[in-house]
Amino acid sequence: MSEKRLRATDLERPFHGTRSRIGLTHLQRLALLLDALPDHAFACGASAALLWGLPLPMHVEEDARSRPHIGVPRDATRIRRAGVSGHRLEVSDDDIVVVEGMRTLRPTRLWIDVSAVLALPSLLALTDALLSVRHPLATMDELASAQRRFAGRRGAKKRGRVHELADGRAESPRESMVRLILVEAGLPAPECNVEIWDGDRFVARVDMLYRLRRLVIEYDGDHHRDPDQWSRDQIRRAELEALGYRVTVVTRRDFDDPAALVRRIRRLLAA
């Protein structure tokens, strides 16, 4: 393309040295940026987490979408350009992989990276997603190995606690956070996403279960307000109660007063 064409007003300039004729998704912007950077640059931090499809707090996700996090090896010069958050990281060749055509951190190395900035609940939610029994990106042993490799580094205590609490059967960040609230209050950890059967008839797959107390805890997000979904929920709850289970529902408003949530669960367990 000629210099005149590159100066045309119909072209956007997402980053220095790049042009686009169309609006880009955040992943397309990231790919375009990495194409314009040296070959040793890679996505790191929250940008790498988004590339792997891992859950992040909304404010962290929005920051990564607006200012991609780009890493380079420790002995290289940090990337400095407008609209980019540059980092120098201790990495080996095995720590870098290619996803969707983009160089990025391997999940276990990413776990170390984000543990320095995420709060305990958010790190647990991300760790549960890494260990997901449906689409695992890492194993407990691999996380333990990464923890030993970076022992004493920032976030080590938090990572150790998360490693103790992580459960790949959890299927949403809110489920992970509810479990953390209960465990941190001294209650036993509930089982995650348990199938309930009546003989050979499948009844339900519940978010959390205290099996011996026959107590089911369900997290209801906003989609449960849909009339059809609400009707299905009521039938499902009636089926569970007919089998002798008690069901309590947690919503996002319960996070405003975690102590009240703990008191409710404690009373139900004691009943």
Image (spheres, helix red, strand yellow):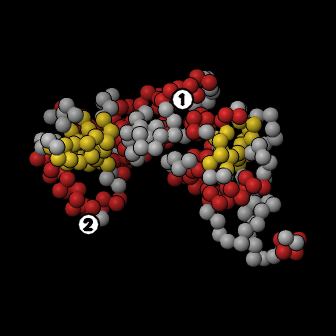
Label 2 sits on what residue type? Pro
For this rendering, which residue is in front, 160 or 148? 148
The residue where tag 2 is placed is 227
Residue at 57% from the left image edge and 31% from the top image edge: 155
Q: Is residue 170 left or right of residue 11?
A: left
Q: Is residue 239 left or right of residue 149?
A: left
For this rendering, which residue is in front, 122 or 234? 234
In the displayed structure, 20 sits above or below 47; it is below
The mark closer to the camera, 1 or 2, is 1
Residue at 52% from the left image edge and 53% from the top image edge: 58
Q: Is residue 28 visible?
A: yes
1 or 2: tag closer to the N-terminus: 1
The residue where tag 1 is placed is 142
Q: Is residue 264 visible?
A: no
**Image quadrant containing the N terminus:** bottom right
User: In the image, residue 85 lies at what x, y percent?
Assistant: 70, 48
Tag on residue 13? none
Q: How many marks?
A: 2
Residue at 82% from the left image edge and 41% from the top image edge: 77
User: In the image, residue 170 lies at what x, y percent?
Assistant: 38, 41
For this rendering, which residue is in front, 238 or 250? 238
Density class for disc 2 (Cα within 10 Å; few <14, some 14-19, many ≥20) is few
Density class for disc 1 (Cα within 10 Å; few <14, some 14-19, many ≥20) is some
For this rendering, which residue is in front, 132 or 13? 132
